Amino acid sequence: MTDFYQPGQRQLQQEFQSTALADRLENIIVQPQLDEAAQAFIVAQDHFYLSTVDAQGFPTVSYKGGAPGFVQVVDATTLRFPCFDGNGMWLSMGNIADVGKIGMLFIDMVEPHRVRVQGNGRLIRDPQVLAQWQDVGLAVEVDISCNWINCPRYIHPMQQLGQSPNVPTPDQPTEAAQWKSLEIVADVLPPQPHAVKDSST
């Protein structure tokens, strides 16, 4: 992958004499598509961290959580995930609409392991796709440019206590966040912000 490392990264590799190591690791672990192990790891996760960049070049990182399998492996170079009800700011999704460059970090704190993904995201409004999830009006499809595993030695082992009761499921509709009942925002709440809209009407 000729363009994996950028000038600033190369400069630091030279400064700390790690260029040969960096090149070796690129050849060994950086892949253009997900292998079977990475695919299985991703679909088993109930959360990931999403990095996006806005039109001015500023990054933001958000936590995305759901039931295991909420991130779908469409194929070895494509991922898809839903956008559950949020705060209405649309920071990450707006960045994807404007720029599209994203990073995804899948990390297991119980049995330390992680997979990093870079790619280009696009917003999906197809009702047939969105119908796979409860109360979802927008999803993201990611064309993977590269992915790689990371050493887990700095991951703090943690115990999982369970799933969030707020994750939408087919038999449990999405409940509004408690803060949305506060008087300070009550008059500006959008109606059913994630209701799936049929584009044919």
Image (cartoon, rainbow, N blue to C red):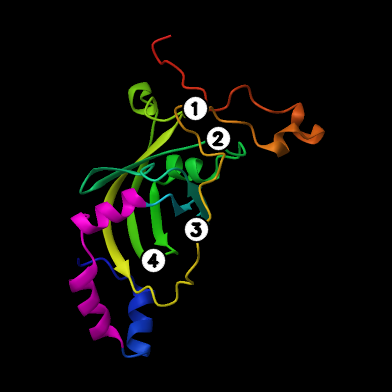
Gap between marks 1 and 4 measured at Cα: 31 Å
Gap between marks 2 and 4 measured at Cα: 29 Å
Gap between marks 1 and 2 measured at Cα: 8 Å
What residue did someone put label 3 on? Answer: 160
Frontmost of labels 2 and 4 is 4
| Residue 41 within the magenta-colored segment of the rendering | yes
Quadrant location of the C terminus? top left
User: Main SS of the magenta segment?
Assistant: helix
What residue did someone put label 4 on? Answer: 111
Q: Of the residues shown, which amino acid type is indicated by label 2?
A: Asp
Q: Is residue 87 above or below residue 28?
A: above
The circle on residue 135 is 1
Q: Secondary structure at mark 1?
A: loop
Left or right: residue 26 compared with residue 45: left
Residue at the right extreme of this rendering: 183
The circle on residue 201 is none
Q: Magenta region: which residues? A: 18-44
| Residue 154 within the magenta-colored segment of the rendering | no
Which percent across, then down, holds residue 115?
33, 62
Q: Of the residues shown, which amino acid type is indicated by label 3?
A: Gln
Q: Earlier in the sequence, mark 1 or mark 3?
A: 1
Q: Of the residues shown, which amino acid type is indicated by label 4?
A: Glu
Left or right: residue 74 compared with residue 66: left
Residue at the image position 28 percent from the left and 64 percent from the top: 148
Neighbours of disc 2 within 10 Å: few (<14), some (14-19), many (20+): many
Q: Are the residues tagged 1 and 4 within 8 Å (C-beta)?
A: no
Residue at the image position 51 percent from the left and 52 percent from the top: 63
